[in-house]
Amino acid sequence: DKMASPMKVAVLGLNPVSEHVITLLQRFGFHLTCIWDRDIEQARKACSDHGIDVDSYFDYFPLSWKDVLISPNVELVFVANSPSEHAEVVVKALSVGRHVICQTPPSVNVEGVSRMLSMARYYPKLFGGLCSHFRFHPALGRAKELLDEDFCGNVVMMDMRIACQSLIAREGYSWKCSHIAGGGALNIYGSQLIDLIQYLSEERIEEVYGSLNTFYNQTDAIKGYRSVTSDDFCSAQVKCFNGVCASFVINCTLPEGFLFSLSISGSKGHLFVENMNLFGQRKGEERQLFYKADVTDTDYITFFDAGCSRMLSWLHGCLAMPSSSESSLKDISGQEVKDSVSMATFEDGLYIQRVISGIVRANETRKWCHLKEVESKILEEGDPFWHSSNIKGSLVSLDNQLTSKPPAGKRKISKKT
């Protein structure tokens, strides 16, 4: 058989995460043909820095993301621009036959993700998913294996914590400064933790409670008539349909660094993730080390790299070998990436966005919020960004799956469309 040619990829939007993704994409054999950003000069510089000869693929440097999508030299798109644009970009990309990876949060509201999901269902042979790198992190992947082996018994509680520097740091005003535009601790990090709760527990969330706080409304770079409305502290508690309770706290007020911790309690034992290392302890036994990270000093890019490397390895294998559903893949370090893990889909994204909306509503009402209340509010009040006739069908479809376990295993994906 002829070896498949490298998949041609375009990256839309430049930020610290997408800039690191560009390096990883090239490392894993993807062929980058364009990096686009609203700041055209910055995009040109990024292309030059990464050795991308855009003139070889485009008659002129794309002035709009739409020009990138319609190019025959683009097969896969990594969407990393403002979350308020995600739905429009993803819908357009899928409609012209492009595979899509979307950075989290998936959108700014439920209706946006509903549009993305509807289009993904219309083109089932195209890959459409979220950059769900937390579930691919080696320590968390090993924790999932231990849960599947009944190490903890019946899980009753999960607790997750993130402590990091400000999400806007010394940046000027951008979408990250507004919760409505997709910024804030809940949107950016909370979307990953909500997905992680679902992935580890294999259950959907039924009811939520949360508190959001903005401690710093202005910074040295943002002052005057503009102010920050996105949350830099988030605390949430959730209840799943099977009785599992979970909580997460995200504190974005540290001067530097990124710290992630996780504890899982069950009837037989406990699991802990500390500084990217995984420990376990059963009742009456000593603590065991199940996974030791290569690095101890962590920042977000280090944490992101550990999960995203394995995620892109999985994606590369799926796009290159769509019919391979039995062989396990390996990441760049040679570690196996188990078949049981897969990237979050837009269906997962709709569920995540619904939970986020529930936490926001619980913060406003100061009481527990059932996710069905979120649906009623959306259908009754409408949405400032999108007005889709497909939203009710998508929400009803999601409701029908709330009591069932999330789908596991690989999807068959066709590279040729």
Image: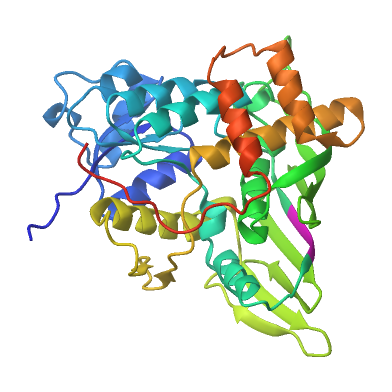
| Residue 2, position as x, y percentages in the image | 7, 57
Q: Is residue 277 above or below residue 361?
A: below
Residue most toward the bottom? 285
Q: Nearer the viewer, residue 143 or 123?
A: 123
Q: In the picture, residue 160 is in which quadrant?
A: bottom right
**Visible in this render: residue 77?**
yes
Instruction: Mark yes or no: residue 257 visible.
Output: no
Segment tinted magenta in the rendering: 156-161
Count of all numbered marks drawn on residues in the image = 0
Picture coordinates of residue 203 (x, y %)?
A: 67, 53
Find out whether residue 224 is within the magenta segment.
Answer: no
Task: Please indicate whether residue 285 sits to the left or right of residue 52 in the image.
Answer: right
Where is residue 170 shown, x and y percent of the image?
A: 63, 32
Q: Residue at x 79, y 71 (%)?
A: 266
Q: Above or below — where is 166 with respect to 247?
A: above
- Residue drawn at (73%, 13%) of the image: 380
Q: In the image shown, does 343 or 86 lie closer to the viewer?
A: 343
Quarter of the image for residue 96 reads top left
Split into 4 quadrants, where in the image is the N terminus?
bottom left
Q: Residue at 38% of width from left, 51% of height from top?
A: 411
Q: In this view, does 233 lie to the left or right of 303?
A: right
Question: Is 160 within the magenta?
Answer: yes
Q: Quadrant of the C terminus?
A: top left
232 vs 392: above or below: below
320 is higher (above) or lower (below) than 296: above
